[in-house]
Image (cartoon, helix red, strand yellow):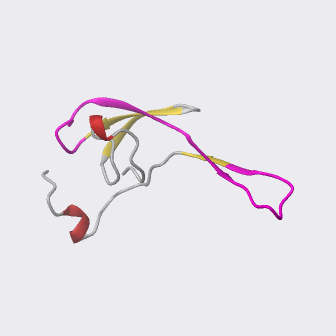
Amino acid sequence: MILRNINPSIGLCNGTRLIMTQLGTKVIEEKSITGSHCGIKVYIPRAILSLTNAKWPFVLKRRQYPLRVCYSMTINKSQGQTF
């Protein structure tokens, strides 16, 4: 499941469910299983998050995929979705 809005025009929004088909070092290939763009292959890049603070003499950077494993979901999250 996607945690951030990546590209809403092709259906990559917060809460979109996907099936991972290939895992790379910088990109994940996935197939959308919900919404009007069901069945298309998409590529999810790593997101770089930066944190700066005036007290710190350095910049903290973190690279992560904006995804979460989703075996199940709450009733509220599943309302309005088709299977």
Percent x, y for residue 73? 29, 64
- Residue projecting furthest to the right: 57
**Magenta stretch: residue 35 in it?**
yes
Q: Residue furthest front?
A: 54
**How many labels sit on residues?**
0
In the figure, 35 relative to 27: above or below? Answer: below
User: Quarter of the image holding residue 51?
Assistant: bottom right
Where does the image place residue 33, in percent across and percent down from the top left?
24, 42
Q: Is residue 78 above or below residue 23?
A: below
On the picture, is 70 further left or further right than 78? right
Residue appearing at x 30%, y 62% in the figure: 72
- Horizontal relation, residue 35 to residue 47: left or right: left
Relative horizontal placement of residue 54, taking residue 25 as reference (left or right): right
Q: Position of residue 55 (x, y in %)?
A: 83, 65
Depth check: give the residue in front, 26 or 54: 54
On screen, residue 77 above or below 67: below
Which residue lies at the image location 75% right of the left edge and 61% below the top edge?
53
- The residues colored magenta run 33-61
Q: In this orientation, which residue lies closer to the viewer: 67 or 69?
A: 67
Q: Which quadrant of the figure has residue 39? A: top left
Residue 36 falls left or right of residue 10: left
- Residue 23, given in percent of the width and then of the height, sits at 49, 34
Residue at horizontal 33%, vertical 41%? Answer: 12
User: At 55% across and 39% down in the image, what residue appears?
Assistant: 46
Residue 21 belongs to magenta span: no
Q: Is residue 9 or residue 14 the one in the foreground?
A: 9
